């Protein structure tokens, strides 16, 4: 599920308008609109403020790399 879909679903599940969510999260209405529109560049700290209202957070996690960088000790 995309972040935008998750936030929209949670907002509606909790019976909030975009404006109400913005006020509760302490962010601008424009930010909520951009978040729900799947804008590719958003401030992670603000995203987490919104997600925290729903008991979630966004964080980086390691992924397995296909081609690891060569070792400094490789010939």
Image (spheres, rainbow, N blue to C red):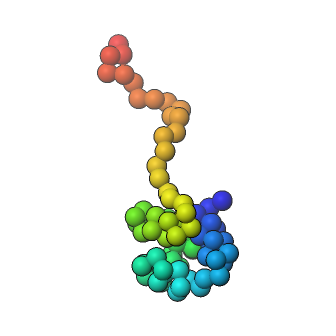
> Would you say residue 36 is visible in this rendering?
yes
Of residue 21 and residue 43, the one placed in the foreground of this image is 21
- Residue 39 in the image: x percent, y percent? 51, 69
- Residue 14 in the image: x percent, y percent? 64, 77
- Within the image, what quadrant is residue 54 found in? bottom right
In the displayed structure image, the side of residue 5 where residue 43 appears, left or right: left
- Residue 8 in the image: x percent, y percent? 62, 73
Q: How many marks can you see? A: 0
Q: Residue at x 53, y 34 (%)?
A: 64
- Residue 51 in the image: x percent, y percent? 52, 66
Q: Residue at x 41, y 29 (%)?
A: 69
Q: Quick check: 29 above or below 39?
A: below
Q: Quick check: 53 above or below 71?
A: below
In the displayed structure image, the side of residue 2 where residue 45 appears, left or right: left
Q: Quick check: 34 above or below 70?
A: below
Q: Quick check: 40 above or below 31?
A: above
> Which residue is at the far top?
75
Q: Residue at x 64, y 68 (%)?
A: 5
> Would you say residue 30 is visible in this rendering?
no
Q: Residue at x 36, y 22 (%)?
A: 71
- Within the image, what quadrant is residue 13 found in? bottom right
Of residue 1 and residue 27, the one placed in the foreground of this image is 27
Placement of the C terminus among the 4 image quadrants: top left
Placement of the N terminus among the 4 image quadrants: bottom right
């Amino acid at each position: 599920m995309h972040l935008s879909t998750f936030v929209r679903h949670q907002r509606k599940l909790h019976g909030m308008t975009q404006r109400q969510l913005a006020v509760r999260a302490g962010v601008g209405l424009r930010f909520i609109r951009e978040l729900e529109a799947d804008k590719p560049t958003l401030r992670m700290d603000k995203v987490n403020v919104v997600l925290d209202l729903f008991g979630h957070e966004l964080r980086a996690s390691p992924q397995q790399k296909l081609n690891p960088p060569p070792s400094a000790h490789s010939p």
